[in-house]
Image (cartoon, rainbow, N blue to C red):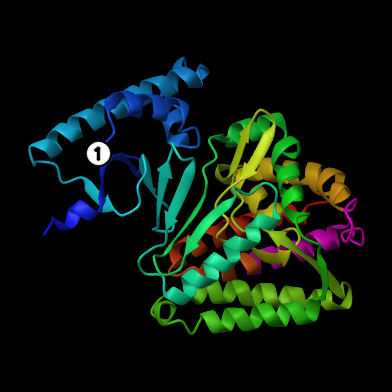
Amino acid sequence: MGNYHDQYHQYLYIGDSLYINSTKNLISVLIDLYFKALPFSFIERKTRSGKLNNSLLLIRLIRVFQLTYKFHKLKRKVRVGTSSKLLYCKAEGDFLLKTRNKGIKIFNIRNKKATTLFAPLLSSEDIENRINTLKQSEKCSLAPALINTALTNRYYTETYVNCRRTNREDLIEAGLEQHAFSVILDVLRSTPPSKIDLFYYRSILKQEFESLLDNEVLRKQDLTNIKEFVTCNFNKLKSFNQINKYIILGFSHGDLWEGNILQESGKSYVIDWETLGYRSCYFDYYFFMIDTTRNQNQLKAQIEKSYFTFFTKKLKEFEGFNSLETSTNCASLYKYLFFTEWVILKLSEGDNVAEINKMISRFQLTEKYIRLLK
């Protein structure tokens, strides 16, 4: 009878959540990391040397040599049985990365496939819901093609897109509307929007929030700050019922930060669709703005520049969105909807209390700047 590990592929831990298949030779590691692992943004992470930072290609070349050399040393340790930095996985690939949500992503460079294994703690029901959600991403032309899903084996496979992730500094320098906003608009246009009664949608969100608070894991956490924040938002949304009877819901990625936008030669792609849903139509806009612009003065300037003069103007050109108001009142309404929807989304993903509290602090700082819009 064979060894248990004979049924699995062996990956060596290199660093930055990166694992490399132990069967790869040094030349293939070198070539694949340099030319075929463009989404791995940590390879081009800026250094402390200002001169080096002027050439991303040089940074990439140095990092690739460093990673390849480390792989070489670890592979020798495995041969003599002294390495403990190993991970065994049934899925075959060249590289493996651990994801932010405790899952695993395996990249098969030769076959141009990326396979995601769901986190061990997710229930079968959760995985089924996520797979059904992922299937909806096929409605968006920017999403990678979904090749296969397997509920029993807890994974899904999609086309591997070998393009660079966008960079925060480059986006701001080039003008956000030239890149990210066009992507957000394309995502929104993937399906027709729907108009819904604000009072009714507020009651749906409230019911979802209260249901999540009954979660066994969350009941053990201190949720005082989260409860106060969401309750405050519900009260603010209630005050809008007299002015805005209806809101518009649209197709939303849910986690559209710059790292999930890939670009190459003017073509854009959007990856990691597990948080897809139908939400208030400014959800991805507000999430991207708040997540991308760290400086609050910069955030105010970007929103003043984009909300009225670009984003809403362009959005109103699309069928179903032409009833949107270009007013400060409308901006505030969708801001409070976004705040509430985001907290509910993160609570639904599991034990994210620390992350939510941190983001709430950013929301509260952000609010005074958005309130100053004229």
Whether residue 302 appears in magenta in the rendering, the answer is: no
Secondary structure beneath disc 1? loop
- Horizontally, residue 313 falls left or right of residue 69, namely right
Q: Can see residue 26?
A: yes
- Horizontally, residue 48 falls left or right of residue 322, namely left
Q: Where does label 1 land, which residue? A: 22
Whether residue 325 appears in magenta in the rendering, the answer is: yes
Along the viewing direction, whichever of 174 and 12 lies nearer the viewer = 12
Residue range in magenta is 316-340
Query: Where residue 373 sits in the image (x, y, percent)?
Result: 80, 51
Query: Where residue 237 sits in the image (x, y, percent)?
Result: 75, 74
> Which residue is drawn at the image coordinates 64% and 57% (left, top)?
137
Q: Amino acid at mark 1?
A: Ser
Q: Can see residue 100?
A: no
Query: Where residue 16 sits in the image (x, y, percent)?
Result: 35, 40
Along the viewing direction, whichever of 100 and 38 lies nearer the viewer = 38
Along the viewing direction, whichever of 284 and 51 lies nearer the viewer = 284
- Horizontally, residue 16 falls left or right of residue 72, namely right
Residue 352 found in image quarter = bottom left
> Which residue is drawn at the image coordinates 59% and 48% (left, top)?
144
Locate the N terminus by quadrant.
bottom left
312 over 347 or under it: above or below: above
Query: Where residue 243 sits in the image (x, y, percent)?
Result: 89, 73
- Horizontally, residue 373 falls left or right of residue 60, namely right
